[in-house]
Amino acid sequence: MNPVYIDPHIHMVSRTTDDYARMAAAGCVAVTEPAFWAGFDRSSPDGFRDYFTQLTDVEPKRAAAHGIAHHAWVCINPKEAEDPGFAREVIALLPEFLDKPNVLGVGEIGLNRNTKNELAILEEQVALAVKHDRLILVHTPHLEDKLKGTRLILDALRRSPGVQPERVLIDHVEEHTVELVLDAGYWAGMTLYPDSKCTPARAVDIVERYGDERFWVNSAGDWGHSDPLSVPKFCGELRWRGHTPEVVRKLTFDNPRRFLDPSGRFRVGHESTT
Amino acid sequence: MNLGPADRDRLLDRTFLEHRAKLLDLAAFLDRCERASATAPPDRRLTALRHAIPLLVDGQPDRARRVLEHLSDPSTAPLEHTPPHPVHGVPPPDSRTPNPEP
């Protein structure tokens, strides 16, 4: 039997039931699913209400059929945050979903193209998470925008009253941003993608250089070019390089659990109440 | 958690051919672009890629970090609005003045 693992960032609304079956067979016992851009801009706040209902009511049932515990994060994603009026209508929906027992916090908020409007909506959602005492999951921008965006996000978090770094995970770090995130005291997420972000080999390189504390690893599998089994492939790369089973488990099970447990709502496999 | 010299041989035995193939892919890609660009104007993606290649062989560490920094937007101020161009994986057109494409 494969060792168990958690995929702490994956967009299962975009994946098939066969993917759930393969993930379960590979040892996945829990996932967390942040709210994100669906590949198109939604035309109304009601579109988001339906999406949040899918995340919190529908998807947990699909996951439970395969013995996987499912949890959600809610927010307006940065790509749809350029219109502040629209974004604030969506933010007004969030408190009712933040009260649900399988919602871990606010995410994935962050920046997309590093605009002033995105930044304002990021700061408002950080304040909402602090007010509701919820965890925060932050998306950092793609490709050439990542380094600048990571710096702007860190500045915004530093300005935000009440933020506790140990309750914030900044995701999609790479070699040029990981040190900024860890030095500021936040958790860092490494996303394993075929063409962008990290490969399993580069993620192991980063762990070997920066240690295995305050890291989680995820597939961020979605509707684009991505691999829902990339976390087990990361485990394989660790094992091949001679890392112990304890290190593998720490990075792919214990660490995400350590970050998520303070939510008071995180469960794995048979512990799930959903 | 540093890799030692003994690990280098294992790394090479397991992955040298994979990386040899990636090098050949890049070489063939540059040849292909050159054949396709006889009459095309310079492209900033190709220029940025060519300028990153010397970082691989300059003998300095942190190549991945330095390549990523080379391919990043060096500006620091937030933008007024979403820019019209999509992300391409290289700095935006007005962020720096790269050398002309050879």
Image (spheres, grey):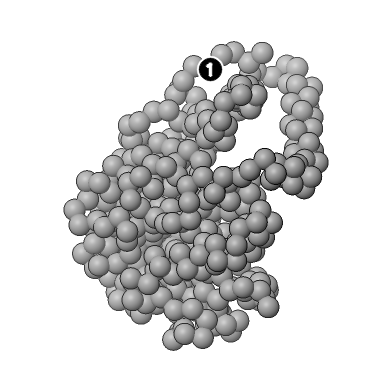
* Chain hosting mark 1: B
Q: Could you tell me residue A158's position as x and y percent?
A: 25, 46
What amino acid is found at the position of numbered circle 1 in the picture? Pro
User: What residue is rendered at 35% in x and 45% in y?
Assistant: A183
Residue at image location 28% in from the left, 49% down from the top: A157
Query: In the picture shown, does residue A152 fall above or below A102?
Result: above
Q: Is residue B19 visible?
A: yes
Q: Residue furthest left?
A: A161
Position of A200 with respect to B72 (left or right) is right
Q: Position of residue B44 (x, y in %)?
A: 58, 24
Nearer the observer, B72 or A181: A181
Q: Is residue A199 above or below residue B101?
A: below
Is residue A58 visible to us here?
Answer: no
Query: Vertically, is A48 above or below B2?
Result: below
* Residue drawn where x is 54% and y is 49% of the image: B1
Q: In which quadrant is the N terminus of chain A drawn?
A: bottom right
In the image, taking residue A15 as reference, residue B8 lies left or right, namely right
Question: Where residue A198 appears, x then y in whole percent?
Answer: 57, 48
Quadrant where the C terminus of chain A is found in the figure = bottom left
Question: Residue B56 location in percent, x, y?
Answer: 63, 27
Residue at horizontal 44 percent and vertical 24 percent from the top: B95
The reply, left or right, for residue A204 in relation to residue A157 is right
Asked whether B33 or A133 is in front, the reply is: A133
- Classify mark 1: residues with Cα within 10 Å, few (<14), some (14-19) or many (20+): few
In the image, B79: left or right of B69? left
Q: Which residue is mark 1?
A: B98
Dot 1 falls on a residue whose secondary structure is: loop
The quadrant in which residue B74 appears is top left
**Count of numbered badges drawn on the protein:** 1
